[in-house]
Image (cartoon, coloured by chain):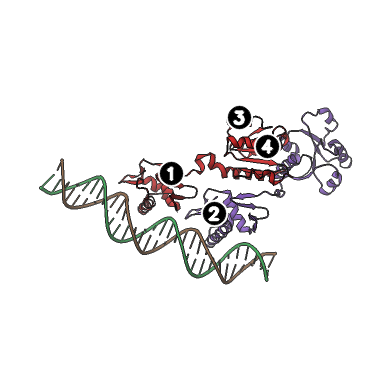
Chain colours: A red, B purple, C brown, D green
Amino acid sequence: MKILYIEDEVSLAKIVKESLESREFDVLHLEDGEFVISEIASYQPDICLVDVMLPKKDGFTIGNEIRQLYPNLPIVFITARDQTKDVLKGFESGGNDYIKKPFSLEELIIRIKNLYTLTKGLNDQKEDASYRIGLYTYNPKTLDLIVQDTVKKLSYREAQLLMILFETKGEIVNRKYILDTLWGDDHFFNSRNLDVYITKLRNYLKSDPNIEIITLKGVGYKMIW
Amino acid sequence: MKILYIEDEVSLAKIVKESLESREFDVLHLEDGEFVISEIASYQPDICLVDVMLPKKDGFTIGNEIRQLYPNLPIVFITARDQTKDVLKGFESGGNDYIKKPFSLEELIIRIKNLYTLTKGLNDQKEDASYRIGLYTYNPKTLDLIVQDTVKKLSYREAQLLMILFETKGEIVNRKYILDTLWGDDHFFNSRNLDVYITKLRNYLKSDPNIEIITLKGVGYKMIW
DNA sequence: TTGATTTAAGGTTAATTAAGGTTAAAGGAC
DNA sequence: GTCCTTTAACCTTAATTAACCTTAAATCAA
């Protein structure tokens, strides 16, 4: 996880950078925001940590510049103790947070992690993405299978099976592979179990006639849409 | 091991103090040297860490005062980057050291370390470290779970469970892991106990519909928001 | 070679069992 | 007493097992 850190107090910055690095964060420290846009372009940070009180350009101005080009890049502002909340209000959107000076390192790390996980779905397609299966949308985080207005929450087993079929879309998955993956072995009872779950999924997915879970007898399954 | 730390830059001081404390040092921070003698008398430090550049009374003056009354108390001076060695020469005796700003925490610790001992006490100075859980804010120190205007004070067990779920946000936690961690074993009664606390937490957290504690039957739980 | 028959694999639905949820009451610590 | 934790009773739902049905491949008779 990469953090762009803009702070003019060199003594503080050095300590914070060092501490963050000891916790496996990757930190680039800048003393001012002069070249922040080009730095973001080359460094590709996951989060920005910006001191509000800066000599050349103040932190909010920098924040605005970042927002315009990178609307989903989370920013944590570091503000003076006595600064009012009102000043920050405009920035308290989903992608921002602030922390008061003097701050606890623990608190800073928690806020960074929190903000990052909150927003990572926005920039990063991988983490919070939902999958499209024909007319359906499946969200692996919430286990929700959605079509039009209806939401079906899948059970653990259903979700596991759907993911295997999704991952191998258009290809053949061996029955044995599914059984071993989900139940640990391909014992007779589990085999019948799999049949049951295949039926369930076919049922859940029947709103879209183009989605098919094709049986390849003696071999496995193939899901297409 | 107790450290008396005199530093006027509050931001830097807080981080240094916290970092030292996280390594089992006990730190008393003063923003100036005004009452240093009485503080030493009551706090009984093993070492003093003194910034040279202070607004009211400069660090060397403080050092001299300490020396007169406590000739054997070691003092580490923190000096500005461009300050010459000559200024410090008079103080480079057996009982003193100095470190240049900006300094590495590791370097500081090495210099202090001659009296390093492990103590059990954890850092209890963390002021308002709090966690964000959806619309909620949770303060692990006060055990307050806050949403809008309402504050719910969690019990010990509730807090433990919430922390486990929080730490593993978005990931699956095994039921067994929770049971072993909170109750020491996964006997039947404890298992029912866990169910009770899951219900409680779900209730407390229901103001934010995006927060879910998903059951993965036969496996565990996954908290998302 | 081709259609009928066999057979094993898988499909469907329902019953059973096990896991967990909910609520309330009992027990304990302060 | 009061608050928290544990125990308990009963309820709900998911996972498994079971029974019976269907289908596709394999075998076989003409």
Give me the C-alpha separation between circle 2 and circle 1. 24 Å
Task: Have a look at marks 3 and 1 and say if they share a chain.
Answer: yes
Name the amino acid, label 1: Arg
Name the amino acid, label 3: Ser
Describe residue B94's horizontal placement relative to residue B152 as left or right.
right
Locate residue B76, reporting x and y percent. Answer: 79, 37
Disc 2: which residue: B209
Is the residue marked by circle 4 packed among few (<14), some (14-19), or many (20+) residues within 10 Å? many
Give me the C-alpha separation between circle 4 and circle 2. 34 Å
Please tell me which residue lies in front, A122 or B117: A122
Locate residue A31, reporting x and y percent. Answer: 69, 32
Check the residue under mark 4 and report the chain it is in: A
Give me the C-alpha separation between circle 4 and circle 3. 16 Å
Locate residue A172, reporting x and y percent. Answer: 35, 42
Give me the C-alpha separation between circle 2 and circle 3. 40 Å
Q: Residue at x 52, y 54 (%)?
A: B175
Residue furthest out toward the right: B68
Q: Is residue B172 above or below residue D9?
A: above
Task: Have a look at marks 2 and 3 and say if they share a chain.
Answer: no
Name the amino acid, label 4: Gly
Does the image show residue A36? yes
Check the residue under mark 2 and report the chain it is in: B
